[in-house]
Image (cartoon, rainbow, N blue to C red):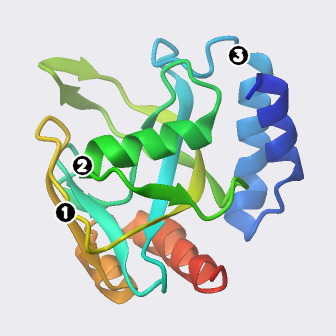
Amino acid sequence: MTRQELIASIEQYQPYNEQEEMDKPLILEWIKNNDNAFLRENVVAHMTASAWVVNKDRSKVLMVYHNIYNSWSWLGGHADGEIDLLSVAVREVKEEAGISNVTPVSKDIFSVESLTVDGHWKNEKYVSSHLHFNVTYLLEADSEEAVSIKADENSGVAWFTPEEALKKSTEPWFVEHVYAKLIKKAAYTI
């Protein structure tokens, strides 16, 4: 995927709610105006990709216990120079959850978000507060496949019902503005 193809994909994406209506132009402008928009070296903001991973009948959601945020959360990560954000999302799920069979429900964007990241320590180095301009994809996996943690990033991997997923996260903004939205959208994408 080229930068122009990603821009076209985001431009064609129809926002689901007001949060996405506000965030979509921010993401587009960032990609268009920053040569290093896909690299962490851009310390103000950079592109990330997330995955909302569900089982076939949408009765379960895959989450990890994120070490930095001390909360159950979705899976995903930094683009690190990769423009094909769907590939980033799939790779991150495989790495973070230790599963090998994960497939996109669609190659289309599932949601977009501008996410704040508080300053934190990673690998004994301080990372200043910044933004993640995020593109999310809906992925499907078998909830019976064995999972495993990625110790440098998470300390738990588990499948939850959508209702349990909302209760397990300790990040109120994500619960209200991201996870609840993704659960509603996924229920209509069987």
The earlier-in-sequence mark between 3 and 2 is 3
The earlier-in-sequence mark between 2 and 1 is 2
Residue type, mark 2 in image? Gly
Q: CA distance from mark 1 to mark 3?
A: 40 Å
Spot occupied by residue 127 in the image (x, y as percentages of width and height): 30, 23
Total labels drawn:
3
Quarter of the image that includes the N terminus: top right
For the residue pair 20 and 151, the one nearer the viewer reads as: 151
SS type, badge 2: loop
Residue annotated with mark 2:
98
For the residue pair 44 and 92, the one nearer the viewer reads as: 92
Q: Is residue 183 above or below residue 128?
A: below
Specify whether 36 is left or right of 32. Answer: left
Residue annotated with mark 1:
146
For the residue pair 83 and 106, the one nearer the viewer reads as: 106
Residue annotated with mark 3:
34
Badges 2 and 1: C-beta atoms under 8 Å apart?
yes
Spot occupied by residue 190 in the image (x, y as percentages of width and height): 62, 83
Where is residue 110, by image quadrant? Answer: bottom right
SS type, badge 3: loop
Residue type, mark 3 in image? Asn
